[in-house]
Each structure stands twice: as C-alpha cells, then as structure tokens.
Image: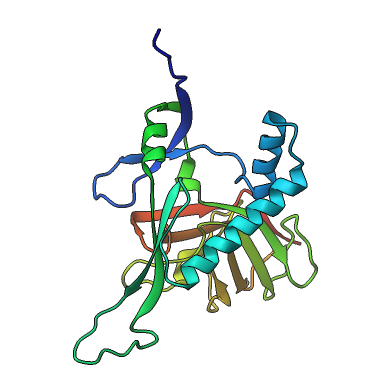
C-alpha cells in the first residue's frame, strides 16, 4: 500500500511588488512566527525522543556549528544534509594576482540540498486573505527629546525621534529629504514642511528638529521612495503617523 505524504500549508499575505513597473503588482510573503533557535530545535527533539537531555542536544549542536565554521575557515566546503556551504572569493583579478582588501572579498555561497527539494514537494501556499498596507511601512512611535513624552506631546523647535518600519526618507528627483516630511494642522489643514536637515535618517528611526509649530494638533507624514536597501519604490509612499502631534 502506497504511503500518502502529509501536505503542509504555508500561509502567505501579499505585499506590493517594488521590482516591476506594473501598477498593482503584488508578491507573496510567507507569514512566519518567530525564528527558531538552537534551543527550540533541541526542545522539539526532546519532545519526540525523551531519552535525550535538552542541554546535551544544545551543546552538541553548538559543537557542530563551531566545527562547520572551522572547516569553512580552512576553505573547505560543508554539506550538512540541509545546505551546502562553499567558500568563494569575489572581485576581478588582472595581471596583479594579489588579494586586495575592498576589491576582493571572501564570502560563503550557500544552496540547499536535494533533501530540501524533496521536502518542498509536500508544501503548498495558501493565501490568508490579507494584503499588507503600505508594504509594511509604518510609524510606530514618536518621542519628544525635551520631555521624554511618547503620547504625541511635542516641543516646537526641539528634537523628536520617530520610530517605525521602512520610514527612511528617500526623496524623488529635485526633492530634499526635508521637503518629504510635513505637518498638517488638523483644524486649519495648513501644511508645514520640515525645515532643518534630518539628524538621523534610517529605515527604523528618524531624528529631526521640529519647526516652530503653533498650538494645535498635527498629522505627521513621511513621503519616501524607500522599500529596502537595494530597491526603490515605483511611486512615492506616504506614511502618516496614527499618533497626532500635540503642541500645547
């Protein structure tokens, strides 16, 4: 009697495709939980094979990893049954055969084994019905450096720290990073543009000095082409903070 293999499902949601020029394109992103550690693997083994101690398994796995690293340091290829790790050197050599730092780099190429390819025959994707808004970009927190307030209360002319995901400002041509950050008064709808240069402009943190905002509530909006370190968006993304800035 033939053995029926269990089919596993990978749940995925959709995010915008930043590579093609077609509007509305989306790509799948697998919805995973936390990354599994050596300790998680050891715990799983203990649950299946109770004669093994978790700390023993963890120590053995760490020894295995250190041994693989030692082989790689020696320039040896490593096949652990799941992946193949192969030392390589990048860069162009001409008449000069010397290894030049910054021109040539030592790297490790990796690819999966046939075990993984066989495993994938048991997997199918299942759409979970969700599309990630704004490609996962968001403003999650705003801190006033003068008072430490995190509830949206800010001090005009002082620095604030904006934290979030994919918020680094990448302007369009003929724009400046400062022109991409605006403050909209919720009552008058007056739009005020950032004046001073950004102090920090990172994917997860922006630090800037506020302009002289008058009393009221403001919506902070970041306009950016940033998607990741290698790819820019086809059209600007507007990220508006759900936390209103309040000047008392």
Give the answer, above or below, for where 13 lies relative to 233. above
User: In which quadrant is the N terminus drawn?
Assistant: top left
**Which quadrant would residue 105 be assigned to in this image?**
bottom left
In the displayed image of the protein, which residue is found farthest to the front? 51
Q: Is residue 113 left or right of residue 20?
A: right
Instruction: Tell me what residue is drawn at x 35 percent, y 60 percent.
Output: 232
In the displayed image of the protein, which residue is found farthest to the right? 147
Q: Is residue 203 visible?
A: no
Q: Is residue 106 visible?
A: yes
Instruction: Tell me what residue is drawn at x 74 percent, y 31 percent.
Output: 50
Q: Nearer the viewer, residue 121 or 61?
A: 61
Instruction: Tell me what residue is drawn at x 69 percent, y 75 percent.
Output: 158
Residue 60 x/y as whole percent: 67, 52
Residue 55 x/y as whole percent: 76, 48
Residue 123 x/y as whole percent: 42, 28
Q: Is residue 69 left or right of residue 179?
A: right
Q: Nearer the viewer, residue 38 or 178?
A: 38
Instruction: Tell me what residue is drawn at x 45 percent, y 59 percent.
Output: 223
Residue 171 x/y as whole percent: 39, 67
Give the answer, above or below, for where 61 lies relative to 76. above
Give the answer, above or below, for where 99 lies relative to 82. below
Q: Is residue 77 left or right of residue 158?
A: left
Q: Nearer the viewer, residue 59 or 216?
A: 59
């Amino acid at each position: 009697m033939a053995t029926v293999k269990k089919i596993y499902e990978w749940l995925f949601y959709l995010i915008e495709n930043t590579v093609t020029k077609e509007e509305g394109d989306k790509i799948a992103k697998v919805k995973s939980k936390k990354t599994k550690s050596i300790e998680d693997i050891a715990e799983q083994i203990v649950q299946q094979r109770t004669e093994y101690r978790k700390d023993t398994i963890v120590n053995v796995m760490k020894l295995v990893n250190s041994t693989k690293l030692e082989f790689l340091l020696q320039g040896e290829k490593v096949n652990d049954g799941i992946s193949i790790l192969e030392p390589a050197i990048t860069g162009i050599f001409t008449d000069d055969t010397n290894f030049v730092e910054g021109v040539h780099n030592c790297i490790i190429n990796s690819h999966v084994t046939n075990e993984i390819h066989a495993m994938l025959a048991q997997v199918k994707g299942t759409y979970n019905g969700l599309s990630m808004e704004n490609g996962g970009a968001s403003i999650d927190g705003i801190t006033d450096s003068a008072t430490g307030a995190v509830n949206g209360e800010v001090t005009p002319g002082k620095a604030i720290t904006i934290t979030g995901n994919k918020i680094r400002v990448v302007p369009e041509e003929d724009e400046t990073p400062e022109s991409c950050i605006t403050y909209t008064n919720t009552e008058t709808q007056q739009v005020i543009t950032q004046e001073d240069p950004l102090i920090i402009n990172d994917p997860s943190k922006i630090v800037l000095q506020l302009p002289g905002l008058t009393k009221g509530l403001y919506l902070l909006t970041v306009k950016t082409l940033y998607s990741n370190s290698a790819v820019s968006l086809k059209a600007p993304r507007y990220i508006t903070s759900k936390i209103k800035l309040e000047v008392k």
